[in-house]
Amino acid sequence: MVIFADTIRPSLPLLNLLAISGSLRAASTNSALVAALARNAPPGCRVTIYDGLGRLPIFNPDEEGERTPQEASALIDAVTHADGVIVSCPEYAHGVPGGLKNGLDWLVSRDAAVDKPAMLVHASPRSLFARAALAEIMRTMSFALYDGGSLEIALLGKKPLEVESILAEPANVLAMRNALSAFADFIRTR
């Protein structure tokens, strides 16, 4: 599924942002959050959701170069062509979920992540260990991690209808737009 939200202000170049949910669950609150970000993108931003983590083969350095699997090449190309990357990640056993880490591993020896602006967003106030681990991984990979404030909308334990209701609340819509606008400013002033 790819969702676009692109209200374009003529004076600003369109920024293409790639949003990745670190969860493979069908009813993931992290996936709901990135979908809401796409729907509520501010003027001058388009958010595209990458949903291929579950189709990526397990990273193997012997499969890089000309042997890179098509699914991994698609992720590498998506990150390469994005102006910035947004990641919403759950916490599993105090760490980053394996599917997301696997996706990041496919980017390690590529230039796609080098100096690529990235922002972390959160659907749970309890994911502190994963946040720290993910930030460390992404900094080590040379992502330009945006530290200007973090977007957190507490969705943990909520049912899908509750999640949609919370994400539609005017204060949360404004928080999403403001976070994306601040990230866009960070990208544009680099």
Image (cartoon, grey):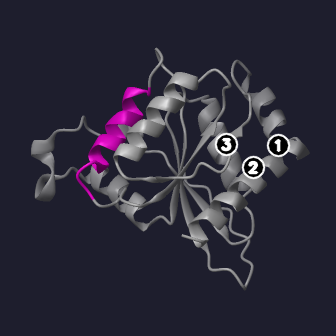
Q: Write the start and end of the magenta stretch as one range.
A: 96-110
Judged left or right of residue 66, residue 167 is: right
Q: Tell which residue pokes out farthest to the bottom in this image.
A: 11
Residue 64 image point, x, y percent = 15, 51
Q: Earlier in the sequence, mark 3 or mark 1?
A: 3
User: Which residue does the numbered mark 3 point to in the structure image?
Assistant: 150
Vertical order, 39 against 98 (above or below): below
Can residue 147 be found in the magenta stretch? no
Residue depicted at x 58% and y 24%? 127
Q: Which kind of residue does numbered mark 1 sit on?
A: Asn
Residue 24 seen in this snapshot: no
Element under label 1? helix
Q: CA distance from mark 3 to mark 1?
A: 13 Å
Quadrant in which residue 103 is drawn: top left
User: Which residue does the numbered mark 1 point to in the structure image?
Assistant: 172
Label 3: how many Cα within 10 Å (few below 14, some 14–19, many 20+): few
Vertical order, 31 against 126 (above or below): below
Residue 176, disc: 2
Q: Nearer the viewer, residue 95 or 79?
A: 95
Instruction: Mark 2 vs mark 3: give the one in front.
Output: 3
Residue 73, disc: none
Residue 124 image point, x, y percent = 66, 26
Element under label 3? loop
Q: Earlier in the sequence, mark 2 or mark 3?
A: 3
Residue 187 image point, x, y percent = 57, 66
Q: Nearer the viewer, residue 9 or 36?
A: 9
Residue depicted at x 55% and y 67%? 16
Quarter the C terminus occupies: bottom right
